[in-house]
Amino acid sequence: MLETLTRVPPDPILGVSAAFQKDDSPEKVDLGVGVYKDESGKTPIPRAVKRAEQEVLAAQQSKSYLSPIGNPGFNAQVAALTFGSDLVGRKGDLSLAQAPGGSGALRLGAELLIAARPGSSIHVSDPTWANHVPLLGNAGLRLEKYPYYDAAHNTLAFDRMIEYFDALPAGAIVLLHACCHNPTGQDLDASQWSAVAEVLARRRLIPFMDMAYHGLGEDLDRDATSIRLIAKAVPELLVAVSCSKNFGLYRERTGMLAVLSAGSEPASIVSGQLGRLARTLWSMPPDHGAAIVDRVLSQPELRQDWMTELRHMANRINSLRTLLADRLTEASQRDFSWIKTQRGMFSRLPLTADQVVTAREALHIYMAPDGRINIAGVSPANVEHVATGLAAVMRG
Ligand code: LMR
């Protein structure tokens, strides 16, 4: 039977890491998968996370099951971090379920939407994270694209996006990147988010927000502006939260789905549905990362230390943006200042698929096939090689 299966092509993002590992050139630079790297090129465990982990292990008396919706302390802490401590005044409308990473939360949300309305479409930004397509599509959602990025000018296609939303039928589902857009780094400002909230409410659309990089754009409050504005404007909202990047818990698969319903009665039905769906998908989520996040956020000293370190990560990424933009502009005699105004780990360089291959083969610079680079992979030590090399590749 299994001989009927065909070989799977490399994952567009994880395949870059696999190819990078095999390269033994001393010049190689990894600008592929979205993981934070520090000054020495390592992906650190934040100090507060390391300490909380030791404390959790020392205090743990049992590893018995929790429940399909996971660790309630973690869920409550992450909800407050995401929506603000007053939960935008909608505590009773909220259903929470821990999930294996942000990807698990996205999948759980997609399953909930399909259960509520089979055959639904979801409108995703053009472009979007490569894995959104199979992750949401395999749950049964049909994917359609809305205008988002003007690649010719490296700006947001804001007017075209609003026009698109304005023409959608009531009940259409729209996937939004809450901050640090993946793959472009092109975010909306607060007034643009207000305009999006207005059109979502007026057209009675259902927003599904992906919050994978909370705190890595500007800071924890400003990065959550999008979610808080929209949560105040619309009756129903889904938010998939990841703790992979901001807590450095990548392999611990720590995430949460939050759903706002139009009242406490539908919210209690949604809670039951989330438990049922989680039970059919993974039965119960892993607790280790969630217990650590709960501890970090509930202990004031750990929380403060984590916030300081997270702020340092965001500031460092933003200063690498300046370094790379200036060196690329100088080396290519073209304007790359737009890299400085984008946020989060990614920007997308104007490279063709062939030029991405040339960068890899001739320069040992690795990036996603669409020209997406992980800014955190740039460093003062490699920026010269990256900027002069890529400028030469772009000249052709
Ligand atoms: C990325 O976009 O590189 C990250 O979200 C990691 C992944 O799973 O693709």
Image: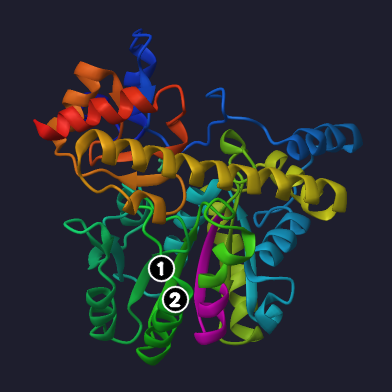
The amino acid beneath tag 1 is: Leu
Image-quadrant location for residue 326:
top left
Q: Residue at x 32, y 51 (%)?
A: 337
Quadrant holding the C terminus: top left
Disc 1, SS: loop
Q: Which residue is drawn at 44% across and 53% down?
A: 343
Q: In the displayed orientation, state which residue is furthest to the left.
A: 396
Q: Residue at x 35, y 19 (%)?
A: 20
Q: Is residue 319 left or right of residue 335?
A: right
Q: In the displayed orientation, state which residue is furthest to the bottom.
A: 202
- 326 or 227: nearer the eye? 326
Quadrant assignment for ligand 1: top left
Quadrant holding the N terminus: top left
Image position of 307 with respect to 324: above or below:
below
- 273 or 309: nearer the eye? 309
The amino acid beneath tag 2 is: Trp
Image position of 78 with respect to 340: above or below:
below
Gap in angstroms between the C-alphas marked 2 and 1: 6 Å
Q: In this figure, which residue is indicated by the disc labeled 1? A: 188
Residue 62 rendering spot, x and y as whole percentages: 85, 37
Q: How is the image coloured?
A: rainbow
Mark identifier at residue 193: 2
Instruction: Tell whether circle 2 marks a residue whose Cβ is less than 8 angstroms from ligand 1.
Output: no
Residue 251 rendering spot, x and y as whole percentages: 57, 33
- 296 or 363: nearer the eye? 363
Q: Residue at x 66, y 84 (%)?
A: 264
User: Do the numbered discs 2 and 1 sit on residues whose CB atoms are within 8 Å?
Assistant: yes
- Magenta region: 228-241
